[in-house]
Image (spheres, rainbow, N blue to C red):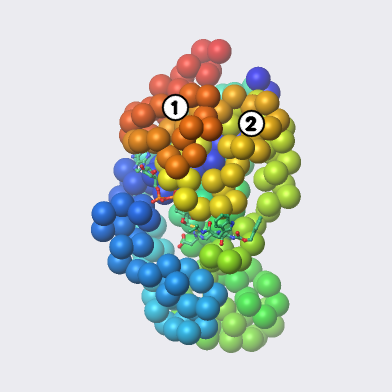
Amino acid sequence: MQKIVILTGAGISAESGLGTFRAEGGLWAQHRIEDVATPEGFSRDPKLVVDFYNARRAQEAEAAPNAGHIALAELEEAFSGEVVVITQNVDDLHEKAGSKKVMHMHGALKSALCAACDHRWPAPLAMAPGDTCPSCQAPAARPDIVWFGEMPYDMDEIFDHLAGADVFASIGTSGNVYPAAGFVAEARRSGAHTVEFNLEPSLVGSQFDDIRIGPASQTLPLWVSELLKG
Ligand code: BV8
């Protein structure tokens, strides 16, 4: 076993106090996806969208990684082979836990993007509609987040990692959103052993060889100690 590829979703950050999307009272219960997570919504009402991500950035600043994030960072540190974390999450809790190889396929709250010249820079805690780009001076700043209908980041590199995976683990994701929900099928195609971590089987749960039910802060430290015991 030389390569472990890990996909994470909102469930791994739930125990750090960051609401998931589909849970009772979750993010999508309070906001319509169309309004806050689509390019159309942004052009329709940029203030609503910028305020939505300012609120999440403020939450992120208060949040700390939990034992689930920490277990993955320890695995990366101790494992003789390669560990890659592909996250759908826009929070920085994997990095705060010490993970080095983290790919934010849906963007990051910590980053701002110029819609005119594609320049990226560290996002201020509170962005404002029409903020100017420090590179081209256009008033075209937006949260560096992949919205619905937009192409996720680093897809070619992600498919390369999936093609080379010996183990594919999916943690705290409901399997509703594509292309992420299709990764297990990709990993299976390249012969990887696949394992899901969730409170309940996800929409693609039947595609996994193994499933570990329970809070990630409890199931992940157990799994990592098993792997490292080898
Ligand atoms: C694209 C950033 C072209 C914003 C996000 C195929 C079929 C159907 C539809 C499509 C399709 N292909 C494309 C689509 C359209 C669309 C899509 O999937 N729509 C869905 C709604 C049907 N996809 C897109 O538009 C994507 N772009 O396809 O471009 C393309 C085509 C081909 C190849 C490449 C590109 C872009 C999607 C990205 C949108 N942006 N996030 C933001 O964060 O505000 S998506 C956002 O929602 C998250 O990033 C995440 O991806 C998703 C939320 O899902 P989860 O993270 O899984 O969270 P959820 O709340 O649903 O579930 C939490 C889970 O955790 C639960 O299962 C729960 O039981 C579990 N849990 C809770 N607590 C714990 C726990 N588990 C363990 N421990 C706990 N303590």
How many discs appear? 2
- Amino acid tagged 2: Arg
Q: Quadrant of residue 212?
A: top left
Q: Looking at the image, is 221 positioned above or below residue 141?
A: above
In the displayed image of the protein, which residue is found farthest to the top?
229
> Image point 69% across, 38% down: which residue?
161
What label sits on residue 61 in the rendered view?
Answer: none
**Horizontal and vertical percent position of residue 112:** 56, 69
Q: Is residue 83 visible?
A: no
- Amino acid tagged 1: Ile
The quarter of the image holding the C terminus is: top right
Q: Is residue 215 visible?
A: yes
Residue located beneath label 1 in the image: 211
**Horizontal and vertical percent position of residue 76:** 57, 31
Q: Quadrant of residue 29?
A: bottom left
Viewer-proximal residue, 163 or 134?
163
Secondary structure type for disc 1: strand
Left or right, residue 167 beside residue 216 = right
